[in-house]
Image (spheres, rainbow, N blue to C red):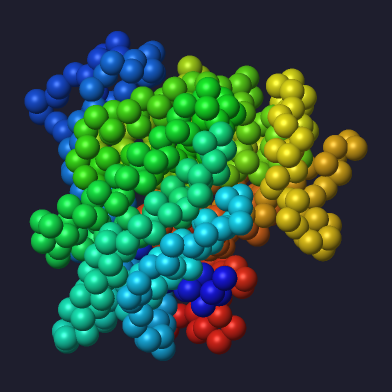
Amino acid sequence: MNNSFKSIRIFLLFLLIPSLSLGLTFSNGKEVKDNNSNKTEVSNNDPFNVNDKYVIKNPGLIFIELESLIDNISVSDDKKIDDCRRYNDFARENFDNYKFKASREGDIKWSIEDDLTGPLTIIFCKYLSGKVLDKQDDNLQSQINLIKTFLIKLSESNYLNSFPKQNDDSDHAYETSAAIIPTLFIYSQFQNEFNNEEKSKIKKMFLDLEKKNRYTFNSSQVGIGSTYNNHGMYTNNYRLLVSILFNENKMFNESINFFLEQMKYNETETGLFKIDSKRGACALHYNLHNLSPLMSILWNLNLQGIDLSKKNLNSKDSISDIVSVIIDSVEDPKLVIEQNKKLGYSSPYSLISCYNWMSDEEKNKYVIKFNNEDLVMPYASSYWINIFMALTDNQDIYNKFLKSQKLKEQYFYDASEEESFVGLYSKYFLSKPLELDTKINKNNLLDELDLAIQ
């Protein structure tokens, strides 16, 4: 694996989004038009009416508009522009059709990160840095041209469809849906730079991948666990973003309806996720892992006027309730262990899948014994707290987060865990960033990389 491409993903750290004021209005589960406002809400009484028709109000908009991004970086008091000037511009002339020995987690995802995310991020970083520093030169247009060439050549290759897929295993859908988000996002920022023929090819490429990954939503094919666990959440997040980007309203409704069904299916008495709480030693890890695509879905729905941030996502739990009990479980593992025992256990592999790759040193650090039960403690990024706060402004939950030393220690950028956030720009979703020291996972950096200028 090319470490330089993988590590360079840090450069999307500084993306921003302005505050949102859109919503959704329902009465008895039906949408109600408000002639005096664009705001709408969702009834807590029946948020699962799959016959509701949702409308894409801002086609093409995922995460943030380019000009808003540049403006927000420019005025931020906490502005850090990563030094990407030392790297040469890079654009792939060809995309290899890799043949993997296996399609297990890691092969596909890391390849996409190296081959697509790394090169594109280098170019995008240089463009953003130039715009924020108010450089008016030919280099800015040349960087746009590099991005265009890169994406056009990608669309003319068979790269994204070349990875092997096991029809009874959701790994392909999960890995591709997670890893491709930065590429999708960067295209969304420059989509108007492409002509109609180029747009058509790129659209087909992304839609073909979505179509290939639909098998994950067929529980009779991959198993109900894979359909409704974090794999289904990541795959559905990609489906939602593609539907918005290309104004596919039917797909948009399918994505929302599946999301609501998934949240309903995963309801438990504690508020933890049902399926991922059955995963033995990995139960806490996968509950946390669900928060990344969940926050992405809620954020992007909000951009389309569908505000679920303070509504119940099942019959009783809001996003605040879910985050609260997961934080509680980090501090008191007994909660997730008892939930696991009540629900029963999954397959033997799923009970240890989150740490069977760890070294002995890492296991000693992250795997604890709690009442003779193994449990993997948080080891992935907790950057999701930024989007949660941008959506809810729930200070009580934030204070609870701050009291959790384990979660605070994980407040770092780790692209291998956070593809759904495009690169963990989320600390700037708030007008004033959270008062947490940003750390960078050293495993994702070149040794000689200067973290920031300014």
Q: Quadrant of residue 101?
A: bottom right
Q: Quadrant of the C terminus?
A: bottom left
Q: Is residue 8 left or right of residue 257?
A: right
Q: Is residue 354 visible?
A: yes
Q: Quadrant of the N terminus?
A: bottom right
Q: Position of residue 305 (x, y in %)?
A: 24, 36
Q: Is residue 332 visible?
A: no
Residue depicted at x 41% and y 85%: 87
Q: Position of residue 197 (x, y in %)?
A: 12, 57
Looking at the picture, tell me which residue is in the foreground, 172 or 229: 172
Q: Quadrant of residue 171?
A: top right
Residue depicted at x 10% and y 28%: 36
Q: Position of residue 45 (x, y in %)?
A: 38, 13
Looking at the picture, tell me which residue is in the foreground, 351 or 265: 351
The mark total stands at 0
Q: Is residue 132 left or right of residue 428?
A: left
Q: Is residue 322 left or right of residue 453?
A: right
Residue depicted at x 60% and y 68%: 441
In this rendering, the answer to whether 299 lies above or below 227 is below
Residue depicted at x 42% and y 78%: 82
Looking at the picture, tell me which residue is in the foreground, 34 or 280: 280
Q: Position of residue 100 (x, y in %)?
A: 56, 58
